[in-house]
Image (tube, rainbow, N blue to C red):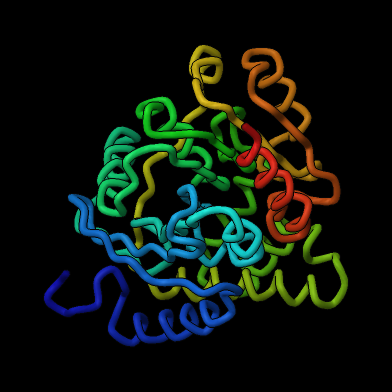
Amino acid sequence: MDPSGHHPFRSAKAREQFLARYDSRAADWPVASESRRVDTSLGQAFVRVSGPADAPPLVLLHGAGGSSLQWAANVEAFARHFRVHAVDMLYDNGRSVYARPATSPGELTAWLDELFDGLGLAGGIHLVGLSYGGWLASQYALRSPQRLQKLVLLAPVFTVLPLSLGWIARAVLCLIPLRWFTRRFMLWLLADLAQKGEEGHRAALEWAEDSFVAMRSFKPRRLVNPTILRDDELAGLKMPTLFLVGENEKIYSAQSAVARIQRVAPRIETEIVPGAGHDLTLVQAARVNDKIVGFLRQP
């Protein structure tokens, strides 16, 4: 913690404003939960835990620019069958606080080992990752397969294919500190949700506002650059693995991503979710929830 008492925020006022919005959004978490804080060598992790204490462990890793609250549309379905641990990633927009930067995938996966130890999760873990969280989940699966039961990758950034030029061009504009650019980017990225009537459009705008408030509140942080898995790495994922991607995905071609997986790692189960893009866990929540729960509960 820095001497001013507001690390990793830009100021005490920024911290107050962000956490007020975060806590307001957290009030809509649809199931009972408890908060856990786990001290690690990289910082203190905040984890939102839901579901029966004696159920199999399920860990959720959210996408870049978000927090555990990205799973609000999914946790109720998951918590019926699993002890769900929704993590606020250290270098992102939640209640976790980093002590020092991570510089490599290995440091991040070692951090996950520390986190799982702190949560008392020795093994048999079901690991689900969305976007950047999906990339990190794949890295962990390669390094510590003995701790995982099953793996679910939801439109993981890089991992299978590089980012599209369209995504890069639009994302860079979000660095301009004007709300309009963030809204424009999020309405494009979450197009299927935004076009799903008034309620969907309002939800997409809420996610856009979350992103804008966070960018204005936190000090600049740098994520470890995600990477594309080699053919032998994809084929080397030892545990049962599910890959889901929306048909209208903007970060890369869903069809090309699935084609590569089917070619080099046919053991990985794949599905293209209709009527969805990078918002697949939101706009097609019921379908995605059912698919994930069915996959994880399958013997």
x 72%, y 44%: residue: 291
Q: How many marks?
A: 0
Q: Residue at x 51, y 26 (%)?
A: 239
- At x 48% / y 56%, what residue is drawn? 83
Q: Position of residue 228 (x, y in %)?
A: 52, 27
Q: Position of residue 101 (x, y in %)?
A: 25, 50
Based on the displayed image, in which of its 4 quarters is residue 124 positioned?
A: top left
At which x and y percent is residue 102? 27, 45
Relative image position of residue 113 (x, y in whole percent): 29, 41
Q: Is residue 198 left or right of residue 43?
A: right
Please indicate, yes or no, whether residue 97 appears anywhere in the rendered image. Answer: yes
> Could you say which is closer to the camera, residue 227 or residue 238?
238
Q: Residue furthest right?
A: 197
283 lies left or right of 97: right
Task: Name above or below for residue 17 compared with residue 176.
Answer: below
Q: Nearer the viewer, residue 104 or 95?
A: 95
For image coordinates 55% across by 34% down, the residue present is 158
**In the rendered view, does 229 fall on the left or right side of 255?**
left
Is residue 178 something that shows in the picture? no
Position of residue 247 relative to residue 17, above or below, is above
Residue 73's quadrant in the figure? bottom right
Say if 270 sits above or below 96 in the image: above
Quarter of the figure with the C terminus: top right
Picture quadrant of residue 20: bottom left
